[in-house]
Amino acid sequence: MIRSLVFCLFLMVISAASFAQTAFHKNKVIAHRGAWKAQGLPQNSIASLREAIRLGCEGSEFDVWMTADEVLVVNHDGDFEGMEIEESTYAQLLTKKLPNGEKIPTLKEYLAEGMKQTGTKLILEFKPSAISKERSERVGELSVKTVKEMKAEKWVDYITFSYEGGKKAIATDPTANVAYLTGDKSPSQLKEDGFFGIDYNIRVLKLKSDWIKEAQDLGLTVNAWTVNNPEDMEWLLDQKADFITTDEPELLFELMKKK
């Protein structure tokens, strides 16, 4: 019995050391809703996550909503196959399938799949509620609590359009990396409120390109979404943006090879 316990502890130490020595990719490429477009996969599916991992993307972005019975699920839009997620129970959502036959993933299922590897980060976007500000805060809080419950903190960074939800996530876990998406806050305000980075539409960053250097000087990361135009990709690479979110990760990889 003692030998078995010692052996188990040894395996745990080896596993931890192996994780520490395995670095996540550093190549700026964030697959938007997973890598779905080139292979015709459903967006935000487990299959599109696996494809982003296979490609070697630095991150795979996905979207989280909360059902009427407070189950966190992964889907881009507020409706799933014609059913409003916030007004439906999880059991009701299970009556529909994604085009490839997958059911709608829960956040726990998506995290469990992503934690099978240590190369691609999981970029969790928790969606603002159309019902109430309080519900937006609840989604942010539950998302962070679920990540902590799954011990997935090393894999996950957060993004959100909800400023209140972002601040609630930071309050729930002050070590969480949370970036803001809307584009209406200056880098200095985000820094003051504890955010990790700016994650703005490419149009915002082109209009306010000085925010890129300002953010990085403040220790914030800079990401742009959703960048599918080669010229925009080139511009962001020249501006030394930290990340680029795209529906065309294969194209971005090709452009980076030429740099």
Image: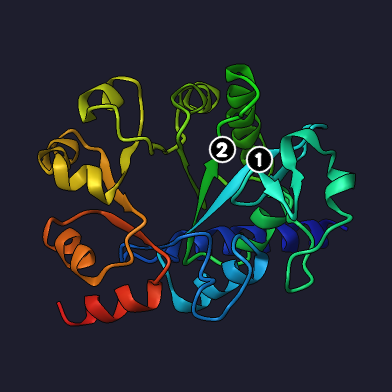
The residue wearing badge 2 is: 127
Q: How crowded is mark 2: few (under 14 residues within 10 Å), some or many (20 or more)?
A: many
Residue 160 in picture, x, y percent from top left: 47, 37
Horizontally, is 89 left or right of 154 in the view? Answer: right
Q: Which of 144 and 211 is in front in this view?
A: 211
Question: Given the image, on which type of amino acid does mark 2 rest?
Answer: Lys
Q: Which mark is residue 213?
A: none
Horizontally, is 194 left or right of 123 in the view? Answer: left
Q: Which residue lies furthest to the front in this view?
A: 82
Residue 251 in picture, x, y percent from top left: 33, 77
Report helix, strand or loop for mark 2.
Answer: loop
Specify which label sits upstream in the sequence, 1 or 2.
1
State how the image is colored.
Answer: rainbow
Q: How crowded is mark 1: few (under 14 residues within 10 Å), some or many (20 or more)?
A: many
Please say if the residues under marks 1 and 2 sit with CB atoms less than 8 Å apart.
yes
Question: Given the image, on which type of amino acid does mark 1 rest?
Answer: Trp
Q: Residue 65 carries which label?
A: 1
Q: Which residue is drawn at 52% across and 26% down?
A: 165
Horizontally, is 28 left or right of 103 in the view? Answer: left
Horizontally, is 148 left or right of 255 in the view? Answer: right
Give the answer, above or below, for where 231 lies relative to 68.
below
In the picture, the quarter occupied by the C terminus is bottom left
Q: Which residue is drawn at 60% across and 61% down?
A: 114
Residue 79 in picture, x, y percent from top left: 69, 46
Give the answer, above or below, for where 18 lies relative to 56.
above
